[in-house]
Amino acid sequence: MSVSVRELSSLALGLPERSRAMLADLLLDSLDDGAPESYDVAWLELAKQRDAQLSDGSAQSKSHGEVMASAREAVRCAR
């Protein structure tokens, strides 16, 4: 049985929020399965850089609520 990406995404978007989050997590994990170990090093370096920026004030953090509100707005605008 072959399902198009359009059909699959339509079905996925019809799932409850928790189920969509679980599916998204599974899909993202599947992208990292073949990732070289150098990706881990790169992510760690980026985390250190961002921590330093937060510490020295050259970057500002956002609350979970602010991030989620921005994400919801981005999704709403993309539809």
Image (cartoon, rainbow, N blue to C red):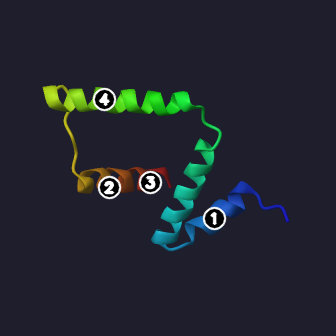
In terms of sequence position, does the residue under pointer 4 or pointer 2 come before the other? 4
The residue beneath circle 4 is 48
| Label 4 environment density (alpha carbons within 10 Å; few <14, some 14–19, many ≥20) | few
Q: CA distance from mark 3 to mark 1?
A: 15 Å
Residue type at the position of mark 4:
Lys
Among numbered discs 3 and 1, the one appearing first in the sequence: 1
Image location (x, y in percent) of residue 56: 14, 25
Q: Quadrant of residue 37?
A: top right
The span from disc 4 to disc 2 (Cα, nearest Å) is 23 Å
Q: Amino acid at mark 1?
A: Ser
Count residues near mark 3 (Cα–Cα under 10 Å), then give few for <14, some for 14-19, many for 20+. Answer: few
Residue drawn at x 30%, y 26% is 49
Residue placed under numbered mark 2 in the picture: 68
Q: CA distance from mark 1 to mark 2?
A: 22 Å
Write the residue at 48% across / 33% down.
Answer: 40
Give the labeled residue for mark 1: 10
Q: Residue at the right extreme?
A: 1
The Cα atoms of the two marked residues, 4 and 1, are separated by 38 Å
Q: Report the residue marked by disc 3.
A: 75
| Residue shown at the point (30%, 29%) measured from the top left | 48
**How many numbered marks are there?**
4
